[in-house]
Image (spheres, rainbow, N blue to C red):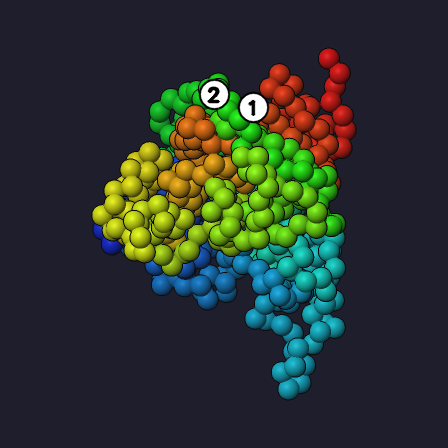
Amino acid sequence: MSTPRLQLNHITKEFSGVKALKGVSLTLMPGSAHGLVGENGAGKSTLIKILTGAYAKTSGEIIYEGKTIEGMNPKKAKELGIHCIYQELNIANHLSIAENIFLGEQPTKMLGLIDWKKMNSDAQAVLSSLQIELDPKTMAGELSIAQKQMIEIARAISQNANVLIMDEPTSSLSERETEVLLSLVEKLKSKGVSVIYVSHRMPEIFRVCDTVTILRDGTYIQTLPVDQIDGTNDLVQLMVNRKLEDFFGKTEVPLKDIVIETRKLRKDGIFKDISFSVRGGEILGVAGLVGSGRTEIAEALFGVMSLNEGEILIDGRKVNIKSPREAISNGIGFVTENRKETGLVLKRSVMENISLANLSLLSGGMFVSNKKEKEIANLYKQKLNIKTANLEQRISNLSGGNQQKAILARWMIQKPKVLILDEPCRGVDVGAKTDIYSQITEMAKQGTAIIMISSEVDEIVGMSDRVIVMHEGEISGELSRVDINPDNIINLAFGGTVNAK
Ligand SMILES: Nc1ncnc2c1ncn2[C@@H]1O[C@H](COP(=O)(O)OP(=O)(O)OP(=O)(O)O)[C@@H](O)[C@H]1O
Ligand SMILES: [Mg+2]
């Protein structure tokens, strides 16, 4: 048996009294992929940050190829070839692909000038070796999330990564993009790279990982070869240690009048002819491939993107929405797909983030009553089971899934007439999904019209009263309750038609 590339022995981590890791061990072999699974807040990202030197461990041992590493820090990690693709991507939109790949390490000529020619050709070589078909001169701002992620992987490979850590790499990818990423992982394995793969999607763990380690509440539970685990249910059981039932909990809600209607919305080059309506209490699922224009429609409704043509009506009245502020005052809420860029104020506390959109609701006049803000925030912390030591924590200290719940709480308090959810369960664990689905249903019961964009077909099927499917910027079909099934959705998403009954 070969020597392990990396061993973590009894790692613990405390954050001002809170034990995030309580003695976690993990052994990583060369050329293999090791899955790391557990519910939101289990300690996966924390373990990874210790490994990359972003956090200092409280106790325990890190051994790299037989040598104990003292005082791990980001520089040391990089020298050892330990790289991480974080949950929130680290790409500069105003730089080209090549510049992003060589960020901070651009090849230079005499006088320290950047050698553009060499940089572009080196970038091309790395991209080709990974079979990524992109032009190194393209600006990163034009890339999809999936493509940005590929660029991060290319960056790691260009710096001779021996250990590549991926923290929920597919949470915002379409099925096709996921497939590309998974084959990239296979390719990295065959090059001898060791991969640590964090995901809430069990089929991916079974597909690419050789071994898997399960964490629960900061505690090490077990490490198992993947072929000794009897399917997703068994793995989930080890993660949550309780029975999961009634996953979607969809209940029939009596539908009220039409709350929002769109007429022939058009944004040149992005979408056109978008006409639909949603009733109070109704959940309209919006399916389609990533890049089919779904998020952009949401952005137009919320006043982030301007329209070239079309009308939006709320309660039968034409409205003119040019900014999120106007959207909110017209009763529209938006849970965004990308938490970091548009959802959260990372420097602020959990409480401030939850109440961000509610200032007018809470304050009789100009200022906010602190006590009331706290009461309401606490109520929703419980309702959604948000794991945080206290409400004064910076929101950036919460685990990814718990940040998502905080955004949802914000809009639930606001009680908008229309709530747009873009990938509501992105990065959320299997148990917490149940909490989120039941809160969405609760809002529908209270009469909110819900527009739910999702790439997860199960979620669309489980939650929607009606579904529109997008294909290349147009609505390729609409499905009523009886016709909502995975086959119909996938056919329409690829521009096909619905099977005749
Ligand atoms: N900088 C920090 N300060 C205080 N607490 C923190 C900090 N970072 C993480 N924590 C806490 O440590 C625990 C583990 O969080 P971590 O982010 O590792 O979870 P995770 O397993 O990655 O979850 P998710 O699946 O939601 O991403 C959580 O309770 C979190 O609030
Ligand atoms: Mg995490």
Residue at x 62% of width, y 83% of height: 112
Residue most extreme to the front: 317
Mark 1 residue element: loop
> To which residue does mark 2 refer?
253
> To which residue does mark 1 refer?
465
CB contact under 8 Å: marks 2 and 1:
yes
Residue 341 higher or lower than 190, as above or below: below
Q: 352 or 46: which is nearer to us?
A: 352
Q: Which labelled disc corresponds to residue 152?
A: none
Q: 339 or 152: which is nearer to us?
A: 339
Instruction: Please state the horizontal and vertical placement of residue 254, each as a whole percent of the image.
Output: 48, 19
Quadrant of residue 375 in the image?
top left
Q: 36 or 134: which is nearer to us?
A: 134
Tell whether circle 1 marks a residue whose Cβ is less than 8 angstroms from ligand 1: no
Q: Is residue 362 visible?
A: yes
Residue at x 70% of width, y 47% of height: 309
Mark 2 to mark 1 CA distance (whole Å)? 9 Å
Which of the two discs, 2 and 1, labels the residue nearer the N terminus? 2
Instruction: Please state the horizontal and vertical placement of residue 247, each as a whole percent of the image.
Output: 45, 23
Residue at x 67% of width, y 38% of height: 263
Q: 150 or 76: which is nearer to us?
A: 150
Task: Check disc 2 and give the amino acid type.
Answer: Val
- Packing grade of label 2 (10 A; few <14, some 14-19, many >=20) is some
Residue 308 higher or lower than 263, as above or below: below
Q: Look at the image and tell me in which quarter the C terminus lies.
A: top right
Task: Check disc 1 and give the amino acid type.
Answer: Asp
Tell whether circle 2 marks a residue whose Cβ is less than 8 angstroms from ligand 1: no
Q: Is residue 151 left or right of residue 53?
A: right
